Every structure is written in structure tokens, then in C-alpha cells.
Image (spheres, rainbow, N blue to C red):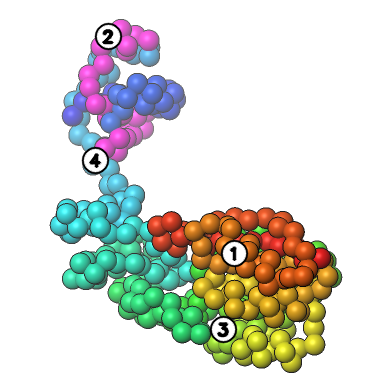
Amino acid sequence: MIGLKVPKKEANSIRLILQEKSILNHDWKIKRSEDYVYLPLNQRPDSEFLGKLGLSSTKVIDTEFEKLKKRPKSMEDYLQGRIPPEKMDEFKKSFDIIGDVVILEIPDDLEEERYLIGEAALKFTKRRSVYRKKSEIKGVIRTRELEHLAGEDQPITIHKEYDSHIMLDVKEVYFSPRLATERKIVADQVQEGEIIIDMFAGVGPFAINIARRHNVQIYAIDINPQAIHYLKKNMIKNKLKGKIYPIEGDVTTVLKDLKVRADRIIMNLPGTAHEFLPIAVEHLNPGGILHYYQFSRDFEDPIKRVESAAHPHQVEILNRRKVKSRSPGVWHVAIDAKLS
């Protein structure tokens, strides 16, 4: 194979020039001796080019190089040649990583290849456990069925998000790592001393992110006992400036008994949060802010729902944003609304 023998002290500058001219061959390892470096080439350089480098044609030699082992750059690279080409296009390459756990979405017609895909995900992500989604999120406790594919069958993990440590069991609670930016957006708006109600708190990602940064009081409510169990653990795992009060139960019943009015209410239950808008408005202080979430094709419908529930109060829409895509044309949208 063609190589260029260059003095060690000049090797790096010559390597950069060869790379710029696309003459350096990246499929083979550069090798070294005591005084020289041997650079693998794609083509034999002419005398004029070598002269510009201050080298003679005698420095172009035939030698052996070691093949460079390239790390696959995607899940598709790991699966190349192992799954029929006609099926590769159907494989959803996006997946969720929650701490040491990977959760995949695999089409039905790749059922037979699911373990191959699981092993590829394990190697590519270098995480501990790989599962696939077996169902949609269902029930009032918002969980889904998961099937173990590769690695350890260990669903309990700790997820790191903006310096917060969130412990959870992916089989027992709902948690989306894709809402990390949204949680930061809300936490950035919070002022010191606020009273906050997190109506569907889960394991506490909103509450922990806020209380870690601000001296506030947060009433974190969830109907799933496992979610409250891990919320309590997360309160211990994170150094909090604020105070969190974890409460297990149906939010309507809890708020009827809870003699608290809030400066800010978080309503991240996009499928059914609209059902709880009246009681949220009832527990919001004048000038308080709602963070309302809904699945919608536009912003018009969720804004109308907030305005209707808030009547006769005036509503000022502070912000509106698409948090993430749910399905073609349908978004998980956020509305930040201030009530007079």
C-alpha cells in the first residue's frame, strides 16, 4: 500500500495538508517508528506536490498498514446485514434513554428481529438495560407495558437532567426525558417565595428542578403511589432550596381538601388536563400563572379552553409553544396563561 514517510517533527503539519487535499486514507492506521511517521495515502502524490511539502519522491513508499476499526455511528450501522434491507427503512431509529435504560419503539413487522435490535441498542448506547414499548400509555397512573430485550432486566434507574437526579422505575411510573427543555423553561420563570401546585407531579421532575433552584413551596400531587414513592426518594437525593409536599391521591379530591391557593399551577397531563381547568382556576391566586398542556393541532383550542374555564377572569397569554410531536400534525403544546 502507498505510504508517505515523513520526519516526526513535521508529521502533524503534513498530515493536515494531506487531509485537506483528501489524499490521506482514513481507513488505515498511521504507524510510527523512532524517527519517522508513515501516513497511508489514497493516491501517489506527484513531484510538484511533494516539493511544496519539502519532500522528495523517495519518501513515497510501499508498506503495510493496519486496518482501522471504525465504531458504528448509528443503530443502523450495527444492524447492517442483519436485518433485510427492505425492513431497515421501517425501523424507528429514535429511542428514549432514561438513565441506564433504553426504551425502543419497534414496528410489528420487525417482531422477529426485536432481540437483534435490542442487542444493537445495548452496544450502541452502552447502557445497562433495553426494553421495547408493548403498549400505549394507559390508565390513570399513566404506565405502559415494556418487554425486556437486552442487557439486565433492571427497570430502576437514576436519570440526570440539568443537575437534578431523578430516580424511577420505568415499568411503574410515567417519565419523559424529552420534556427536559420544557421543565427548564418553567423553572426559569419561577420567582422566589412562590406557592406552586404541580397537579400531576409523577416522580417530581418539574418539582425537583424548581425546588433545587428556588426557595418555594410546592404541593406535588399524583394518583400513582409508586410515583409518590420515588418523588420522596428524589427529594432526598437532590439538594433543595425549596420545600416539596408530596401528596398521593386524585387531584380533584386532594385540592378540595387542600386549603391552599397558588401563585403558579403546572398541569402536565396533555390528554385530559382540560377536565381539571375549573378546579385549577379556583385554586389560583389573582395574577397567578397556569402552565397548561394539551395534545392539539393548533394553539387556538387550548387557549379557548383556558379562557372558558377562567371566565369571568381576564386571561393574558404569556407564551405558547410546541413541546414535542405526538403524531403527524398533532403536538404536545404548552400554554402559559396569567389570570387577573
Quadrant assignment for the N terminus? top left
Tell me the mark number nearer the camera, choosing from 4 and 3: 3
Disc 4: which residue:
66
Q: Residues within 10 Å of mark 4 (few under 14, many from 20)?
A: few
Compared with 97, 26 (above or below) is above
Instruction: Name the kind of residue labelled 1 in the image.
Output: Pro
Instruction: Name the kind of residue labelled 2 in the image.
Output: Ser
Disc 2: which residue:
47
- Please state which of residues 326 and 62 is positioned toward the viewer in this rendering: 326
Who comes first in sequence, dot 2 or dot 3? 2
Residue 51 magenta? yes
Residue range of the region highlighted in magenta in the rendering: 26-52
Compared with 145, 327 (above or below) is above
Instruction: Name the kind of residue labelled 4 in the image.
Output: Glu
Who comes first in sequence, dot 2 or dot 4? 2
Disc 3: which residue:
227
What is the secondary structure assignment of the residue under circle 2?
A: helix
- Residue 276: percent from the left, percent from the top? 63, 79
What label does residue 302 carry, if any?
Answer: 1
- Please state which of residues 1 and 196 is positioned toward the viewer in this rendering: 196
Instruction: Name the kind of residue labelled 3 in the image.
Output: Ala
What is the secondary structure assignment of the residue under circle 4?
A: loop
> Could you tell me how far apart the alpha carbons at marks 2 and 1 are, in whole angstroms?
71 Å
- Residue 178: percent from the left, percent from the top? 51, 62
Give the residue displayed 63% in from the left and 62% down from the top. Answer: 303
